[in-house]
Image (cartoon, rainbow, N blue to C red):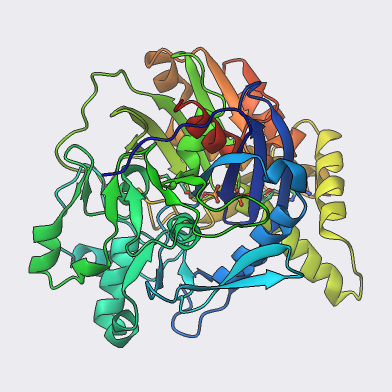
Amino acid sequence: MAASLSCSAGFVLGMDLGTTSVKVVLLDAQSKTVTDSKSFPTNSDTSSTSDIHAKEQDPSLIISALDQCMGSLPKDKLKKVKCIGVCGQMHGIVLWKSKSGCEWLSEDHEIIRFIPKDVSQLITWQDGRCSADFLSSLPKPDSHLSVATGFGCATIFWYMKHRPEFLSGFSDAGTIQDYVVSMLCNLDKCVMTGQNAASWGYFNTTTNKWNTQILKDACFPVQLLPVVVESGAVAGHTSSEWYGIPAHTAVGAALGDFQCSVYSCMTDKGDAVLNMSTSAQLTFSMPAEFTPPNSPDPLSPIAYFPYLHGSYLAVAASLNGGNVMATFVRMLDSWMKEFGLEVNESRIYSQLIQSALAQPNTDLTVTTALLGERHDPTSSASVSQISPSNLSLGHVTRAVCRGIIENMASMMPPQSLQAAGVRCIIGSGSALSCNTVLQQEAERVFTFPVVYGKDVDSAVGVAMVFNDQT
Ligand SMILES: Nc1ncnc2c1ncn2[C@@H]1O[C@H](COP(=O)(O)OP(=O)(O)O)[C@@H](O)[C@H]1O
Ligand SMILES: O=C(CO)[C@@H](O)[C@H](O)[C@H](O)[C@H](O)COP(=O)(O)O
């Protein structure tokens, strides 16, 4: 049985293993302030040979970005870390061999770190290999949450059908954040909180249990399923010194990044949170007495995800957030390369934002469902209302940003937020905090005050969760 954490004086390390970047923060346990934060892009997307719809990432590159983050935190403070909170991208799955999932290395007798060993690629939440036909062939879950492509259990079902030999090479599975916790604590068996288990499908959030019998009846390899623990529980203790953090430091079972972004900033029942990183979520908390329906509504853009202490968040989780801007940036980058021009990516972002700030309005219309949406997988992106006068960089960028926000508002309209008692929207996530045009559009489309806090994101949130366990 997992115990709860207790962090006294010292620091809490918060870590977010995101789809684009890894972020780490040090939270002073007593003053509850963030003293240090670092972020590095993982550049870990790999092109898959198995399927053009596949979206995979290389765990070695994710851990390498984590190493870069850890290596740049102050050593004197790392020695005083009392507990570690980990969160990250939900829904995805990585598989490993439990006794040899990583190798520990010591560099210059000083830095002790691990590198992934017998580990699969991470098949992410953006994976699109499970078609609607395939999903409809799967057993009906005993859960209020429907199963979508990119969900861990759906991905396992896909491998059972298309590459069963792949699964037999592994004994353990989890999200990438569960993998990191397992390696840090040298766990024999992966543990997972209900927050991440719910994101895999075939998990009943009321009983906090996998749909084991339904899965067994479908010959699903249930031995791969992690052991479920309460959100906020300790998963184990570090088995070795790690970047100066002492061995035997408590590590919390990994949480979902979106719940942690909410924890970092939601203080009032009237707050909704708009988080925008690679994906985007708009969410508000449900009353404490809320219980989810018995069965899923696959056509609803709103899902109810477990939060903490048995409560739920209503969430419009869009597959199309900062990744839409990133795709636009990469498109421009590749066009410029064809002209023989090299422009730094962050220069492209800043020019786009500057041009769109000078173009406060546009009649150009961009719909931005590049990856479709879970409740509407066939939706796609489009450009319309094109005229000779609205093709400047400013017009197009403004229309892309507007499209991203309007897509969110179509999933969770301002009227439904109002009906739920929302009075204010808090913006979080780097895609939003780095992009004033997205902020302007959010303020225009949602008829509520939109505020942006300092130190508001998932890495801070997960550090706060475990600091508040005292
Ligand atoms: N220089 C930049 N200026 C503005 N936005 C940026 C910049 N670089 C990246 N972004 C946005 O940030 C998003 C990634 O945010 P990040 O917090 O790293 O995501 P995640 O938490 O999913 O790893 C990108 O998809 C892009 O929209
Ligand atoms: O789909 C959901 C929740 O259902 C997502 O919100 C969830 O947060 C996932 O972790 C994200 O899709 C990935 O997070 P990020 O890397 O975009 O921050």
When the figure is inspected, residue 254 is found, relative to residue 52, above or below; the finding is above
When the figure is inspected, residue 183 is found, relative to residue 363, above or below; the finding is below
Whole-percent x and y of residue 64?
66, 66
Picture quadrant where residue 231 is located: top left
Whole-percent x and y of residue 155?
33, 68
Of 79 and 323, nearer the camera is 79
| Position of residue 359 in the picture relative to residue 150 (left or right) | right
Of 256 and 405, nearer the camera is 256
Q: Residue at x 56, y 21 (%)?
A: 425
| Position of residue 391 in the picture relative to residue 381 (left or right) | right
Q: Is residue 364 visible?
A: no
Q: Residue at x 18, y 65 (%)?
A: 138
When the figure is inspected, residue 101 is found, relative to residue 295, above or below; the finding is below
Q: Residue at x 44, y 76 (%)?
A: 100
Whole-percent x and y of residue 20?
63, 56
| Position of residue 404 in the picture relative to residue 338 (left or right) | left
Q: Name the quadrant of the N terminus.
A: top left
Q: Is residue 8 visible?
A: yes
Residue at the extreme right of the image, as rendered = 341
Of 334 and 116, nearer the camera is 116
Query: Number of marks in the image?
Result: 0
Whole-percent x and y of residue 107?
73, 70
| Position of residue 1 in the picture relative to residue 126 (left or right) | left
Q: Residue at x 46, y 79 (%)?
A: 118
Of 46 and 232, nearer the camera is 232
